[in-house]
Amino acid sequence: MKPVKATARNDHLLFVVFAVVVLAMPIWLAPLGAGYPDLMQKFAIYGLFAMGFNILFGLTGYLSFGHAAFLGVGSYTAVWSFKLLGMNPLPAIALAVVTTGVFAWVIGYISLRRTGIYFSILTLAFAQMSYNLAYSVLTPITNGETGLRVLNDDPRILDHMVGRGEADGSLVATLFGVEMNGMPGFYFCAAFLIIGMYISIRIFRSPFGLMLRAIKTNQNRLNYTGVSTRPYALTAFVISGMYAGLAGGLLCVTDPLAGAERMQWTASGEVVLMTILGGAGTLVGPIIGAGLIKYSENIFSAFNEQTLHGIFAFLPDGIEGAVVSVAGLFVGEGWHLTLGLLFMIIVIFLPGGLIEGGKRLVDMTGRGPRGGGGGRAGDAAPQAAE
Amino acid sequence: MDAILLQILNGLDKGGAYALIALGLTLVFGTLGVVNFAHGALFMLGAFCAVTVNQLIGLEQVTQDPTQLTPWGTPVEIREPYIVSWLGDTGLLILEYSVPVSILAAIPVMIVIGLVMERGLIQFFYKRPHAEQILVTFGLAIVLQEIIKTLFGANPLPQTPPDALRTAADVGVMFGFEPGQIVYPWWRLVYFLFAALVIGSVFAFLQLTTFGMVVRAGMADRETVGLFGIDIQKRFTVVFGLAAVVAGLAGVMYTPILPPDYHMGMDFLVLSFVVVVVGGMGSLPGAVAAGFLLGILQSFASMTEVKSIFPGIDQIIIYLVAVVILLVRPRGLMGRKGVMEG
């Protein structure tokens, strides 16, 4: 691999390749058994989620442990937009992004007064607060444990204006007469993923992005230089929250149901894992990470005793039984065990993520690191401002 | 007045659990400098030690009595726990006091778990950024709780306190109130006393023994202690084991109050972290004080009178306090100046 320079031409190339790869997902995912719309929607949505998280964590180094709250807020806003305005996804998405942005601004404004582990705990505290409230007092808004759904007798003003308000039965998000489930739903999400990627590239290459990286590398030095870092970090936090809100909105576009469990802190942990797995601070890493996690979640949770017996049928009977019972712990219901192990393995052996792992592999196979490895910015930098 | 006293009492048992877990977290953070997100899992493992012990000593010998028939025509099955047939009345007593008895089993088990965890994983993360410590221990916590879920199932497993302590104590009488005004379950009182005892022994251990002195010196300045030729690392590993035991014992004794399930660790962990932050990162008295304080605050917030003014306050009070503390006094209530004030 040649040391890729971040020139405008390379970025255009990256963007075009990315767009083509995303749009061609139904084709190249089909042989992997993942070419069906529901899963691809998840890839796109969680890709967006991780991409946004990466703008905060990858660039500034602030580890938020409460990003799931934004996903939840985005979801609830989108469903309320469906209920009040109608099943058009565009206002729902717009509202979800805006509301989440405001919400993120409030939380970010407070949390960013602290750095390091305190920031993580503050965001975690806010996320838990939102989660607890969604389950208890805010039940009129969130519908508690049942989850918020669109009902037939909801106002849906816009739908009534165009005369589609009486449509009973299927309440699916509909854009220009196209129902947003299945393939159209995927392309809808994919479009946002590509737009999100474009914005992400622009942020990475902008002076603003450079400033964010500087925060990660050494915040103290920035402060000494007379730069107030907080507005930059806050902007990154809000942008990152808006990505999460967009992802939450899209989750409800493809399936108009919002539940509080989306805001649980394990969900926040999952997006951290996605980002780390792919490679924090890289452009495409988090999306790859999100895709891999969702893919393996799907594959592993679908496994059961029978499929395992099928896979290990070539083994002698006694061994097969043992192997199946051991492997059975990690699949189906046990998917979370695999996830936890994955978490540990990645953090222990590959904290730079798959992208860095790939780079190391390329370096090892001979070409050698020209230009000093060109690793992540601030890779070896001392932890800023503990 | 009696309502206030009652709420304080109500907060004590939960506060005791918070204080014990937060104490361990602070010990680990103060000595090893590691942010351990798997500490809640240790609490949960302790609780499941109690469950295991209870299941083991409750193992029953099933004999069939052919002289008597059930209404279905099968011989009546006589179930008798082995322990009763071996030890007679002593066995019955052990069976009844299975939760306190579990402490004996939990201490060695938790020491082993703690040492294995520290040597096997945590020691490689001393020098890594806090973010990575958080993530790897978070992963470990998930793994531990999933293992427990596979072994014991997903449902809570209620444990019973001994018969003598199952009733409620009329605490009010001791303070000169009318009988029946302040009634409080005995077991919760026991839990509070137990927590106080454990906390007291940990402090005594750190203050009064040479080992504790070395550990405290190491917390203050690890390099200098190392220069004296003391292998401080070895001591810190023992401290990790100690923290694991404290968390485990907190879990064992908490089982009659809250039926243990596999995710109880996670639930308590987040709160205990908040407790540590409120008390002051690295301050042991702070962790204990904040634990009880937040436990009591939480029970006050659950009063219907308070809830009618601020709906939902009971759900968020602890986090709210943490947010305020972090913004107003970032080093926490009793944190030292300049230590982790970030």
Image: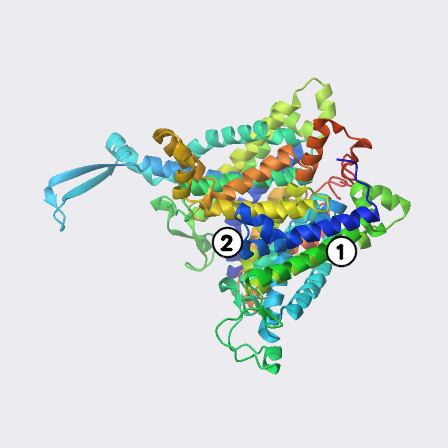
> In screen coordinates, is B311 left or right of B177?
right
* Corner quadrant of residue A319: top left
In front: B69, or A362? A362
Please, which chain is the residue tagged with disc 2 on? B
In front: B22, or A187? A187
Locate residue A87, reporting x and y percent: 59, 72
**Which quadrant, please, contains the N terminus of chain A?**
top right
| Residue A47, placed above or below residue A153 | above
Locate residue B169, reporting x and y percent: 41, 51
Disc 2 target residue: B10
> In screen coordinates, is A84 left or right of B13?
right
Are the residues at dot 1 and dot 2 in contact (C-beta closer than 8 Å)?
A: no
Q: Nearer the viewer, mark 1 or mark 2?
A: 1
Q: Residue at x 71, y 21 (%)?
A: B226
Q: Is residue A321 visible in the rendered structure shown here? A: yes
Look at the numbered disc 1 and give the secondary structure of its residue: helix
Disc 1 target residue: A199
Locate residue A341, reporting x and y percent: 55, 38
